[in-house]
C-alpha cells in the first residue's frame, strides 16, 4: 500500500447524522491524478441510502426551519471555526485527489470559512417588509422563509468551494440539504461536511451522498420532499437537470460552463495583462468555469502580447501539486487529457500554431502541457467548445464592435475579462457583454459577498452575494386584520 493510500481518508456517506461506510450502490476507486495510483474506495449510495437521506432531510427541515436565525448563525460560526482549524488537512486532500498545487488548495480551503461566515451573517438579515395597508387595523407583511429540503450536485474542480457555497447558503437560510459530492474527489468534501457535523447540526439537516450521478439526480429531483435543486457542472447535464426540475416544478440554480472571452484593447498595459491572464488561465490547470479561454487581442498589440504570453506560459513549472515549486498540476482524470488532445489536434489541423505546449506530457499522471495557440480559425472546435483545461487560443480583432460581436457570439455567458486604460471603453464594454460577470483589468470575481452566476447557456441564478441566500428563500405574504 502506498503512503498516499495510507494517509488518505476513510471515505463514506453522511446520512441522518451518521457516517455510512458500506452502502448498497457498490464502490468506486479514487485515483491520484499526479501518478494514477489508487487512493481509496468510495462507497456509493443506492436507492435505499437515497431514500434514507430524503427522509432525514424531511425531518431535519422540520427542526431547522424552526431554529432561530440567531442559533443557525452560531452553528455556522462553529462550522467555520472547524473549517479554519482544519484548512491544511483539507488542502492536502484536495491536492491529493484533485491535483492542484498545494498553495491553490490552501486558498480554496481557507476560503471555505469565509463563505460560511458570510452566509451566517447574511441570514440574520433576511428581512421581509411591511406594506402600507388599505384598511385600518390591517397589517400587510412580506416574510421570507426557507424554501425546503435542497438537492445539490457539486463537481470535482473545486471539491470544497463548490460544495461550501451550496451547503452554507441552504443551511443559513433554514433549509436542509442533500449534497451529492464529486465522486472523483470525495475526501476533501467529506472533511468539509465533517466541519458542519462537528458543529452540532441537528440530524438530517446536512446529508452527503456519492453515487451514480444520473441515478442520484433521477431519484432526488422528482421526490416531493425536495423543493430546490442546485447544480454546478456542464451545460448538457445542467439542461437535463433543469428540465427535470421544471417538470416537477422545483426551483433551480444552474451554475454551468463558460467559454470566457478575455479582451485586450490596444491601450492596455500589456505586461500587466499578460501577468494577470497567465495566472488566471492556469489556475487549477484551466479547469475552472470562469477560466479565460478565448483571448481577443487588438491587432496593434497582438504579436507583442502573444510572444510575452507564450514565454510566460513556457516558464510555468508543471508537476505534482504536492511538489515544492509546482505552478500547474495534472488534470483531474484521463478523459480531460483526451479532451485537450482532441481540441489542440483539431485546431492545429486547421492551421493554428502552438507557441507553447501542444500535447500530453510524457510521464505518469494526467498532465497536459499548458498550450498557447495563435492563428486559430473561428471554425476550430476550441473556438466554440469549452476547453475546461490549459488551452489559451488567441484571436486578433480590429474594432470595439467587432470584438463585442465575437465575444457574444457563443451560447455561453458566464465570465468576461477586459484590459483597457480607457474608462469609456470599460463602461461601454461592460454594458455590451452578454455575461453574468465582467472583470476589468484584474481578476475580481467569486468572493463570498459578490454574486456568481451566468446568463444564456451558462445557467441561471447566483451563488454568493445577497442573491446566493435568496436562492434558498421563498416569499410569503401575510395580511392580518386585528380584531
Ligand atoms: P460531466 O458532464 O460528466 O460531469 C460534470 C459534473 O456533473 C460532474 O460533477 C458529474 O458528477 C455531474 N453529473 C454528470 N451527470 C450527472 C447527472 N445526470 N446528474 C447529476 N450530476 C451529474 O463532465 P466531466 O468530465 O466530469 O467534466 C467535464 C465538463 O464538465 C467540462 O467540460 C465542464 O464544462 C463541466 N464542469 C463544469 C464545472 C463548473 O464549475 N461549472 C465543474 C466541473 C465540470
Image: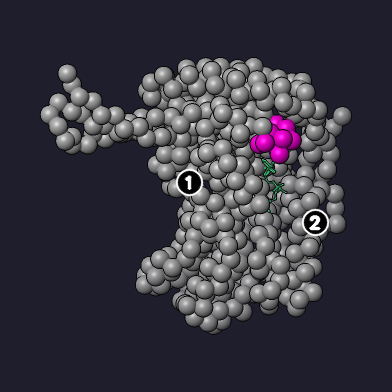
Q: Vertical placement of 14 versus 313: above or below?
A: above
Foreground residue among 300 and 409: 409
Residue 159, quarter of the rendered image: top right
Q: Secondary structure at mark 2?
A: helix
Residue at 54%, 21% (x, y): give it. 58
Main secondary structure found in the magenta portion: helix
Q: Is residue 99 above or below residue 45?
A: below
Q: Residue at x 60, y 17 (%)?
A: 17
Q: From this view, report whether residue 427 is shown above or below residue 164.
A: below
Q: Is residue 9 left or right of residue 76?
A: right
Quarter of the image with the C terminus in it: top left
Give the labeled residue for mark 1: 462
Furthest residue to the left?
136
Asked if the residue at tag 1 contacts the one at tag 2, i.e. Cβ–Cβ closer than 8 Å, the answer is no
Tag 1: Cα neighbours inside 10 Å, few (<14), some, or many (≥20)? Answer: many
Of residues 285 and 405, the one nearer the viewer is 405
Question: Residue 346: image x %, image y %?
Answer: 77, 69
Query: Is the image coloured rainbow, by chain, by secondary structure, or in one colour?
Result: one colour
Magenta stretch, residue numbers: 210-218
The residue positioned 67% from the left and 29% from the top of the image is 209
Residue holding disc 2:
338
Judge whether residue 199 can be spotted in this image.
no
**C-alpha gap between disc 2 and disc 1:** 31 Å
Amino acid at each position: 500500500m502506498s503512503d498516499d493510500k495510507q494517509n488518505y481518508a476513510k471515505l463514506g456517506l453522511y446520512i441522518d447524522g451518521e457516517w455510512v461506510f458500506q452502502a448498497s450502490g457498490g464502490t468506486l476507486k479514487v485515483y491520484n491524478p499526479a501518478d494514477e495510483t489508487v487512493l481509496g474506495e468510495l462507497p456509493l449510495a443506492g436507492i435505499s441510502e437515497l431514500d434514507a437521506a430524503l427522509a432525514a432531510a424531511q425531518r431535519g427541515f422540520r427542526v431547522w426551519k424552526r431554529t432561530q436565525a440567531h442559533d443557525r448563525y452560531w452553528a455556522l460560526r462553529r462550522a467555520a471555526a472547524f473549517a479554519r482549524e482544519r484548512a491544511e488537512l483539507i488542502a492536502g486532500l484536495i491536492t491529493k485527489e484533485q491535483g492542484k498545487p498545494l498553495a491553490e488548495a490552501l486558498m480554496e480551503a481557507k476560503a471555505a470559512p469565509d463563505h460560511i461566515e458570510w452566509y451566517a451573517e447574511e441570514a440574520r438579515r433576511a428581512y421581509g417588509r411591511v406594506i402600507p395597508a388599505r384598511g385600518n387595523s390591517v397589517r400587510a407583511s412580506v416574510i421570507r422563509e426557507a424554501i425546503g429540503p435542497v438537492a445539490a450536485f457539486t463537481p470535482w474542480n473545486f471539491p470544497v468551494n463548490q460544495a461550501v457555497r451550496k451547503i452554507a447558503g441552504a443551511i443559513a437560510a433554514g433549509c436542509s440539504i442533500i449534497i451529492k459530492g464529486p465522486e472523483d474527489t470525495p475526501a476533501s468534501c467529506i472533511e468539509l461536511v465533517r466541519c458542519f457535523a462537528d458543529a452540532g447540526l441537528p440530524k438530517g439537516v446536512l446529508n452527503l451522498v456519492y453515487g451514480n450521478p444520473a441515478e442520484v439526480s433521477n431519484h432526488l429531483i422528482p421526490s416531493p420532499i425536495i423543493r430546490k435543486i442546485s447544480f454546478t457542472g456542464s451545460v448538457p447535464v445542467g439542461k437535463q437537470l433543469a428540465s427535470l426540475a421544471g417538470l416537477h416544478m422545483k426551483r433551480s440554480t444552474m451554475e454551468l460552463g463558460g467559454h470566457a472571452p478575455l479582451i485586450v484593447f490596444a491601450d492596455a498595459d500589456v505586461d500587466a495583462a499578460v501577468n494577470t491572464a497567465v495566472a488566471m488561465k492556469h489556475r487549477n490547470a484551466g479547469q475552472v468555469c470562469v477560466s479565460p479561454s478565448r483571448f481577443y487581442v487588438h491587432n496593434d498589440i497582438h504579436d507583442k502580447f502573444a510572444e510575452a504570453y507564450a514565454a510566460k506560459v513556457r516558464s510555468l513549472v508543471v508537476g505534482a501539486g504536492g511538489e515544492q515549486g509546482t505552478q500547474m498540476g495534472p488534470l483531474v482524470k484521463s478523459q480531460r487529457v483526451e479532451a485537450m488532445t482532441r481540441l489542440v489536434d483539431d485546431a492545429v489541423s486547421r492551421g493554428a500554431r502552438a507557441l507553447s505546449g501542444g500535447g500530453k506530457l510524457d510521464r505518469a499522471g494526467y498532465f497536459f502541457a499548458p498550450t498557447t495557440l495563435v492563428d486559430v480559425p473561428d471554425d476550430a472546435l476550441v473556438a466554440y467548445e469549452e476547453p475546461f483545461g490549459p488551452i489559451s487560443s488567441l484571436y486578433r480583432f480590429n474594432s470595439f464592435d467587432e470584438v463585442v460581436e465575437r465575444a457574444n457570439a457563443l451560447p455561453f455567458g458566464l465570465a468576461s475579462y477586459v484590459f483597457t486604460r480607457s474608462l469609456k471603453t470599460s463602461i461601454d464594454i461592460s454594458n455590451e457583454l452578454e455575461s453574468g460577470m465582467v472583470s476589468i483589468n484584474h481578476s475580481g470575481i467569486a468572493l463570498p459577498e459578490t454574486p456568481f452566476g451566468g446568463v444564456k447557456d451558462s445557467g441561471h441564478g447566483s451563488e454568493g452575494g445577497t442573491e446566493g441566500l435568496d436562492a434558498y428563500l421563498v416569499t410569503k405574504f401575510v395580511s392580518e386584520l386585528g380584531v
